[in-house]
Structures are given as C-alpha cells and as structure tokens.
C-alpha cells in the first residue's frame, strides 16, 4: 500500500467500457469529477488570471495558428503555466474587447505539475490508472490545458487528431477531457468522427529545422464525408479520446462559457521525438 495515495479515487473501467473505447475511439464517463473538484479548478484559474499581467504587445499572444507557431511564448510553454488569449478578445489595435477574465482562451501547459491546486485534483483523479487500463504501459502526463470557450467569442478548434501535436513512436497519446461546465451544441461541445481513430495520422506538428514550426503531411486524403457526432456533456463528465480520433469544437456564440480541463498522457516506453513542438524537462 502506497502511503501517498489515500485521496485517489481510481476508477476501474468495466470490460465493456474498454471495448467501447477501442471500438469507437472515445469513452464517456458521467459524474467523473465532483462539484468541489470542478470549482476548485475554476476558482484556481480565476485566481491565476487575476494575477496574470497581460503583456503590452498583445497581438503575439493570440492563439491564431499563424502567429503562434513561431512564437517563443507558445513554444516554450511545455514546462510553464501560460495564458493565451481568445483571438476576438483583442482588436486590431491591440486593445481588449472584453474584461481580462473573459479574454483568456486557455491556460497551459504544465499546471498539472507546477501548480499545487491543479496538481492535487489531477492526482486525486488518477488518470494514470485509466491510461494503464487503456493500454499505456508507463504513463507520462505530458500536457494539461484549462480551456475556457468564453461567452460570445470562444474560438473554434478545427478538426484534428491529438497525436498530431503529441506524437510518439509508436503513437500512444490519450486525451482526457473534463467538462468543468455543461457543454452543449450552443456553447461549443466536443464533436467527433466515431471510429475515426482508425484513420491514419494525417499530419505532424513539429519544430522546423530553421526555427518556428511546420506541419508534416503524413496522409493527404480528405476527412471522411460524414456528420460529426455531438458529444454534449453535463458538468463533471469525462470524455476520453484516442490520440487518433478526429475531434472538433465550434465557436461559442452563446452567452455561457464552456470551461474544460484536459490532460494528455503518452507512454514513456515510446520514443518522444526531439522535434516535437512541446518539449519539457518535467516528468
Ligand atoms: Fe484536441
């Protein structure tokens, strides 16, 4: 018995849940996180944003793909706690269009290791046990994000596979997506291609030899023509995503935010390339 694990509430998956994950590429577990844990994460985020001093030159801190990709603030965030703005939170002159608390697209990418509050909740939830049950032999928590999907301006996340960004050889990434607030079709819930984890990895996002980043196209066939499945989720729901499962979320034009916390695991036994965009010396 390990002395340091009394607070963990490890979830034992049933055989049919593991089967469903392997068949569909995702698994939904309702009431995975309680209201105390959800509010702890949301209150901690609010506190961190309160303490965050926005930079004077705000344009470089948006989450826009073009701008962020060569941006050191983004590329060196793997072992830090950093703040990324919603694109529509800042106008062309660099001025805020909303209050600071409503301007943040996400906080990432190492609060699960660096911040005591996040760390405690993440440890309590024992994602490594879930990862092991789903086939990861030696789990490593490589990345966390607190995603806000702010009211009215929450940005779209285009269709992608997480292994594009957290690539290992062989591929091993599993994503854990926790609804801190209710996620509906109005506020930008997750949408997936069921069974789409059988689709080969389409691209890899990596460091370019001459600085900045690039996408390597691995498979240029188009996404299958099929409607995405909306995964509406009550607050407290966990959605587990296979690293190759294509997923998407629409912009939030509703008046309600859609906060989520995500943690991604990879297998330490797989090779983690030195040219992956996310590099961290944290375990
Ligand atoms: Fe993703």
Image: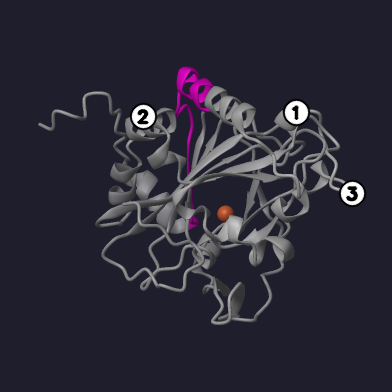
Q: Residue furthest front?
A: 56
Residue 261 lies, with reference to residue 155, above or below; the image says above
Q: Is residue 38 magenta?
A: yes
Place of residue 188 in the rendered image (x, y in percent of width and height, measured from the top left): 72, 41
Q: Residue furthest left?
A: 1
Residue at the location (65% across, 34% down)?
Answer: 183
User: To which residue does mark 2 refer?
Assistant: 120
Q: Can the viewer see residue 234?
A: no
Place of residue 131 in the rendered image (x, y in percent of width and height, measured from the top left): 33, 49
Q: Is residue 237 magenta?
A: no
Q: Quadrant of ligand 1?
A: bottom right
Q: Which mark is residue 93?
A: 3
Q: Can the viewer see residue 114?
A: yes
Magenta residues span 24-41
Q: Disc 1 to disc 2, how far (Cα)?
A: 27 Å
Is 237 on the left-hand or right-hand side of 188? left
Mark 2 Cα-neighbour bin, 10 Å: few <14, some 14–19, many ≥20: some
Of the numbered discs 2 and 3, the one sitting upstream in the chain is 3
User: To which residue does mark 1 refer?
Assistant: 256
Q: Secondary structure at mark 1?
A: loop
Q: Nearer the viewer, mark 2 or mark 3?
A: 3
């Amino acid at each position: 018995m390990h002395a340091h694990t009394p607070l963990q509430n490890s979830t034992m998956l049933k055989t049919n849940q593991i089967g469903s994950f392997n068949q569909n590429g995702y698994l939904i577990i309702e009431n995975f996180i309680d209201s105390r844990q959800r509010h702890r994460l949301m209150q901690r985020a609010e506190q961190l944003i309160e303490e965050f001093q926005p930079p004077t030159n705000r344009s470089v801190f948006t989450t826009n793909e073009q701008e962020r990709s060569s941006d050191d603030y983004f590329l060196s965030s793997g072992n830090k706690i950093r703040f990324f703005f919603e694109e529509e939170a800042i106008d062309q002159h660099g001025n805020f269009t909303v209050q600071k608390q409503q301007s943040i697209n996400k906080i990432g990418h190492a609060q699960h290791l660096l911040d005591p509050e996040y760390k405690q909740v993440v440890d309590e939830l024992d994602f490594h046990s879930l990862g092991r049950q789903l086939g990861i032999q030696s789990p490593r928590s490589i990345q966390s994000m607190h995603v806000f999907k702010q009211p009215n301006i929450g940005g779209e996340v285009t269709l992608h596979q997480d292994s594009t960004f957290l690539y290992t050889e062989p591929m091993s990434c599993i994503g854990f997506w926790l609804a801190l607030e209710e996620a509906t079709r109005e506020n930008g819930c997750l949408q997936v291609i069921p069974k789409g984890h059988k689709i080969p990895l389409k691209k890899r996002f990596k460091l370019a030899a001459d600085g900045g980043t690039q996408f390597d196209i691995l498979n240029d066939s188009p996404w299958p023509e099929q409607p995405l499945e909306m995964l509406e989720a009550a607050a407290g729901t966990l959605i587990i995503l296979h690293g190759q499962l294509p997923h998407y979320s629409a912009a939030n034009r509703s008046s309600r935010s859609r906060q989520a916390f995500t943690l991604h695991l990879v297998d330490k036994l797989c090779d983690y390339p030195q040219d992956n965009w996310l590099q961290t010396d944290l375990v």
